[in-house]
Image (cartoon, rainbow, N blue to C red):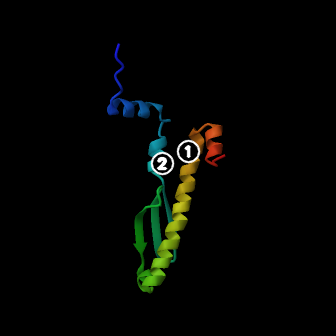
Amino acid sequence: MTHVPPTVEEMLAEDEEREPLGTRAALDAITRTVREDDVVVTVDLHGKLVGLDLGERAMGLRPAALAARLNRLTAVAAEAALAAGAEVLAAVLDEPAAAELGLS
């Protein structure tokens, strides 16, 4: 009998079956928002900026000051999003794996 390797579709289906229910969806849904004065930034789990609201006062800032504020707030939001992702993973990983990733 000849061994036939699984197709990509079969491997993806198998991966979906092994995934704890909702883990991927929970990770995909993670966003974190940080506000300071009238600057609001929202990032996803990867730290990518997915929302930005600049109020009137923010638009009056010098470009360098606004850029610095956006950079700082985005970093704070990204750290919070990453922590939320770690919590989701810690809930589904076994103890040794969580410890290896520093989640326990």
Q: Is residue 33 above or below residue 23?
A: below
Q: Of the residues under marks 1 and 2, which one precedes in the sequence?
A: 2
- Given residues 27 and 99, the one toward you in this image is 99
The residue shown at (63%, 44%) is 100
Residue 15 x/y as whole percent? 43, 33
In this picture, residue 72 sits left or right of residue 99: left
Pointer 1 local density, CA inside 10 Å: few below 14, some 14–19, many at least 20: some
Q: Residue furthest top?
A: 1
Residue 71 x/y as whole percent? 49, 72
Q: Quadrant of residue 82?
A: bottom right
Q: Is residue 65 above or below residue 43?
A: below
**Kind of element beneath mark 2:** helix
Q: Quadrant of residue 7?
A: top left
Residue identified by numbered label 2: 27
Residue 85 x/y as whole percent? 53, 51
Amino acid at the residue labelled 1: Leu
Q: Give the distance between the C-alpha atoms of the residues marked 1 and 2, in whole angstroms.
A: 8 Å
In this picture, residue 100 sits left or right of residue 75: right
Q: Is residue 57 visible?
A: no
Amino acid at the residue labelled 2: Leu
User: In the image, which disc is placed on residue 89?
Assistant: 1
Dots 1 and 2: beta carbons under 8 Å? yes
Residue 99 x/y as whole percent? 65, 44
The residue shown at (64%, 49%) is 102
Q: Is residue 47 visible?
A: yes
